[in-house]
Image (tube, rainbow, N blue to C red):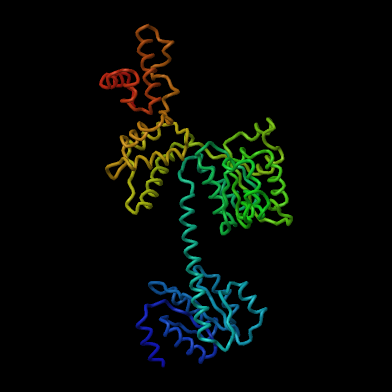
Amino acid sequence: MAEHAKEHAKEKADKGAVLVVDDDSDIRLSLEMLLQYEGYACWTAKDGREALARLEREAAAEPPRRPVLVLSDVKMPDMDGLQLLEKVREKEGAPPMILISGHADVAMAVEAVKKGAADFLEKPLDQNRVLVSLRGALRAEKLAQENQKLKRALGGRYELVGKSPAIRALAAQLARVAQSDAAVLITGENGSGKEVVARNLHLSSPRASGPFVAVNCAAIPAELIESELFGHEKGSFTGAHERRIGHFEAADGGTLFLDEIGDMPLAAQSKVLRALETREITRVGGTRPMQVDIRVLAATNADLAAAVEAKAFRMDLFYRLNVIPLRVPSLRERLDDIAPLAEQFLRQIGERAGRAARTLDADAASYLRTLTWPGNVRQLRNAIEAANVFAESNQISKADLEQVFENGPALSTPSTVATLPADGDPFRAPTFEEFKNQSEALFIRLKLAENNGNVKRTAEQLGMQRSHMYKKLERYGIKP
């Protein structure tokens, strides 16, 4: 039979190695034959210490090897299966482990699972039961690895990009705040990345394995907000055809992100305050309170302190949310981060399209720094995505970006809009001729700024030939 098992195993793809640990040589041989028949390589050890030595030896090989699973007896001399389980679980990239015992009881099985065992089997072993348990453990391990891979990918998507002093200071704050469970109020302009900060906090926190539930408070009608947040029971109001889980309940064990909290109706604020203080909710139409374990992050671009003064926002809710305040800097405050952000967006676009990402040429990067970015990082991302469509080469050029702003609304303006010409205030000019020149230069700068540095559009607006406009720019040393 052993020869037949080996021949059968050769016909199957190599599924990796399984380490079998048992002080009974007959059981080791029986499991080895079964595993080889199923296409697995089989390593064996007679006790826990020999098993650990085998694991270390294989890990030190070139290339390093590790078993896909460990199958171990519990009752063994010197080091038993539970002790081996603890040692294996300490290792990085530990394989799943199934324990077997001829003296099994419920307490032992519960202890094994608490310590991280994938399953617990009783002797005498049933071959089908062994295979079912093995496949289930390997499937769970694969799902766990895929989940970690996805989290790493999401973590990359929500990482803070840049090395500017403003973003480094924020990153340092996040590293400390992430380990706390206190409420955080994130403030900043629209498009500055408040949700990115919230997700970064969640993924860096002990709650990272739990859900992250984002709620846009401004997008929920006032009459539905209580149902959206706390859920409702079937028949609790017209249209409630079935029970619905609310956002608080959905975030149980994780993080609830209340975006645009300043737009939450006053009527709902008192209920939210009570839920945050008691960690208890009741569905609309329900009678049974439920405990929820959540961390609350809130965000707003409004001045909540002013809203409190104006009686538009509850003071007690403001203080409940503002335990740890975090401010996200605008893109204008982190100009050095524009090029790295643009490059990241281009990489993401390339990944989605399944092709090599375009890069940003030096002139394009310099041009982006001259804009004021009222829409912040969100506006930059949209501009890069649009420029990527227009680009005909492997690099995004200044002309590609100008085409984006020429076809769109004039939201980003060159930073020269608030500055005077280099030669000073025209009203302090010593002669009338110099006053005219300085005034004309300032006027052209302002109009050029209004048109995002687009010379063609500015010339048309001023009723001037484009060639004449270029001469004016050259004369006054103005760079579009």
Q: Residue at x 42, y 39 (%)?
A: 380
Q: Is residue 449 above or below residue 346?
A: above
Of residues 63 and 19, the one drawn nearer to the viewer in this rendering: 19
**Left or right of residue 244, residue 469 in this image:** left
Of residues 304 and 291, the one drawn nearer to the viewer in this rendering: 291
Q: Residue at x 70, y 45 (%)?
A: 273
Q: Residue at x 65, y 42 (%)?
A: 322
**Left or right of residue 203, residue 266 in this image:** right
Q: Quadrant of residue 319?
A: top right
Q: Is residue 235 above or below residue 145?
A: above
Of residues 39 and 26, the one drawn nearer to the viewer in this rendering: 39
Q: Position of residue 26 (x, y in %)?
A: 51, 92
Of residues 366 and 372, the one drawn nearer to the viewer in this rendering: 372
Q: Position of residue 289 (x, y in %)?
A: 73, 55
Q: Residue at x 34, y 36 (%)?
A: 401
Q: Position of residue 360 (x, y in %)?
A: 34, 42
Q: Position of residue 132 (x, y in %)?
A: 51, 79
